Image (cartoon, grey):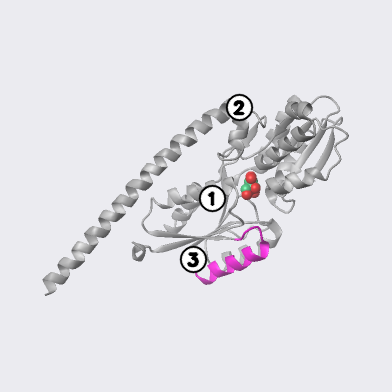
Amino acid sequence: ADREKKYVIGISQCMLDDAWRQQMIREVGIEASNYDSIKVVIKDADNDNDRQIEQIRELIAQKVDVLIISPFESAPITDVAEEAFRAGIPTIITDRKVNTNQYTTFVGANNYDLGFAAGTYAAKHLPPHATILEIWGMMGSSPAQERHNGFRDALQQRTDLTFRPVEGDWRYDVAAKRLKEIDFSQPIDFVYAHNDMMAIAAREHFLAIDPVRGKELHIIGMDAVANAGLEAVADGRINVSFLYPTGGEQVIRTAMQLLRGEKVDKYIPLLSGLVDKSAAQTLLLQSERLSNYQQRIETQRSRMDELLNRFNFLRDSLSVITLL
Ligand code: FRU
């Protein structure tokens, strides 16, 4: 069926090895399968700015029809994103920003608002003179900066608070390692992690050093994606999370609009919201149902492909016979 594909959509992913990115790729695949005319090429930079720059250059050289970039760090990826845009390739930036407006559109939730919502939630649960541990995503990536700024702005009136930052690089293993290096003889009252994987690392860390206090410690995260934080909120390991949609579906839909020559907005916002225990339980049920449907659709699609192949084979053999 490949010979019928007219357009190539290139996706440069900063990494693929976490549940959130896996979910994004799944959504991309489902949405892309609705269109016969496109082929999606995904490059995985495996947590490396230089590799991502190189891969984006390959996609530019290959003259993809639309380029989607999910940057690793904002500053290092800026120039190459501009290069693509200036080469005339419609360029969609998603999730993490670049430091330029030389791109076609940005798809993503508002991370400042997410941080602000987290701060507003925290304000309701913080005792006076609380110490807050903030576990950062990569400091060079825009969602970390914005989640931090929004959170702090929401708590501006609270001059009684103490903030302790730690860099977790968005990763469970990095957060777990860094937490072990910190002296927590002054106890923590609240943990704000920039994503759920680091929130889970915090939960495990504090349970290990003090099972009683650890169990009571208030911990919040972000993403609320299945196979990661959603289960942790549903079973009470972390208190709440905030939905951070991956936008896999929207980036493909936007790419299709660009391919059809339609104008798209410079910013395509994705919605977000607080996910508490009961919301998480509902979302989990829903996501199970969805993946069942998905599987059924995939089975039917491969059956159809098989039939189509057989049909093509028969047609080709028939035309050979007629020629004879
Ligand atoms: C996934 C991730 C998410 C986070 C996003 C921020 O790789 O770390 O957990 O919300 O990237 O860019």
Q: Earlier in the sequence, mark 3 or mark 1?
A: 3
Q: Residue at x 35, y 66 (%)?
A: 3
Decide which of 253, 215 is in the foreground and name it.
Answer: 215
Q: Secondary structure at mark 3?
A: loop
Residue 265 badge: 1
Image height check: is 140 above or below 148?
below
Q: Earlier in the sequence, mark 1 or mark 2?
A: 1
Which amino acid lies under the numbered mark 2 shown in the image of this protein?
Lys
Q: Secondary structure at mark 2?
A: helix
- How many angstroms separate mark 2 from mark 3 (CA)? 43 Å
Q: Nearer the viewer, mark 3 or mark 1?
A: 3
What residue does disc 3 label? Answer: 64
Decide which of 181, 37 is in the foreground and name it.
Answer: 181
- The verdict on residue 61 being magenta is yes
Q: Is mark 1 within 8 Å of ligand 1?
A: no
Image height check: is 76 above or below 198?
below
**Quick one: which residue is furthest to the bottom in this view?**
324
